[in-house]
Image (cartoon, rainbow, N blue to C red):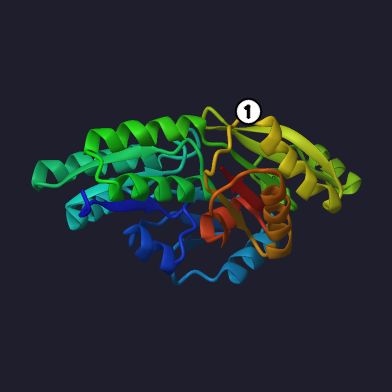
Amino acid sequence: MSDYRIITDSSADLTDEMKTELGAEEMIPFYMHIAGEVFTDDESLSIPVLLSKMKACTEKMASSCADPGAWKAAFEKAKNAFAITISSTLSGSFSSACTGLDMAKEESDCTGYVFDSQSAVSGETLLAYKLREFINEGCSMSEIIEKAEAFILKMKTYFVLDDISNLVKNGRMSHVTGALVQILGIKLILGEKDGRIELFGKARGYKQIADKMVSMIASSGRIIDGDDFIISHCNNLSLAQEIVDKAREKFNFGKMRIIEMKGLSSFYACDKGICMSF
């Protein structure tokens, strides 16, 4: 099983070092559409430029996933691979990856499986580490699939937005509500439930965020027994570190990793956004 590779879409914020460590060099990009421009979420993308374009844009912005052909090529190149996508309720990436795998199987002798992470950002990264763990243990393909699908069901993902302007621009929050949230200094704590985004709490002001995020771990019902923790941030290392430090004091986590968000994650979390998974 050591020859199995991992393929992700670019919602997983993997660094070059992580890609090598995980055997996940193949990352399928998303595309961000801002005021008539298309930005590809790959190594050439400048996050500061992306955020600047987003801030200047007053109209609706959108993102799109890669077509099945990109996934087909990745599966054929890897020969044997497990793919991880953002939640199927948030994007068509999972469907595109499944179609791409079917296409690859018809034209080559490759094997593979596509996981719907039912999460995004740090959740995809965390799942990639679990997959590599199962692969390195020498588990059979069916065992890896069973263990990974079980992990997806218990994994928790929460995030907090400092800037909700993108939600307003995309019509996911009214202008009136958005204005009130900004004026009152309320920070929304959102999370994944059955692959969908739901509101889990609110923090009054910036100083409450770390304590609120750590309290989400306690109230999540997730049993922490040496499991790993990953937090992704968009220009907010200090808050990410504070959350890690507080979580380490209260819970028995294994490895705790802090990662900088890439394109798609920054597009939706916006500047200062934070996303944690465990």
Give the amino acid type for the residue marked by disc 1 in the picture: Gly
Relative to 157, is 165 above or below? below
Residue 133 vs residue 148, the one in the foreground: 133
Q: Position of residue 178 (x, y in %)?
A: 79, 42
- Name the residue rendered at 37%, 51% in the picture: 8
* Residue 239 left/right relative to 82: right
The C terminus: image quadrant: top right
Q: Position of residue 258 (x, y in %)?
A: 59, 59
Residue 183 vs residue 3, the one in the foreground: 3
Q: Position of residue 116 (x, y in %)?
A: 40, 36
- Name the residue rendered at 87%, 49% in the picture: 205
Relative to 64, is 34 above or below? below
**Residue receiving disc 1:** 221
Q: Name the image quarter holding residue 267.
A: bottom right
Relative to 51, is 159 above or below? above
* Residue 257 left/right relative to 64: right
Residue 84 vs residue 277, the one in the foreground: 277
Number of numbered discs present? 1
Q: Position of residue 155 (x, y in %)?
A: 52, 36
- Name the residue rendered at 25%, 50% in the picture: 69
Q: Name the image quarter holding residue 113.
A: top left
Relative to 216, is 238 above or below? below
Q: Would residue 121 be seen by someone viewing this image from the given angle?
A: no
Q: Would residue 47 be seen by someone viewing this image from the given angle?
A: yes
- Name the residue rendered at 67%, 38% in the picture: 217
Mark 1 residue element: loop
Residue 149 vs residue 63, the one in the foreground: 149
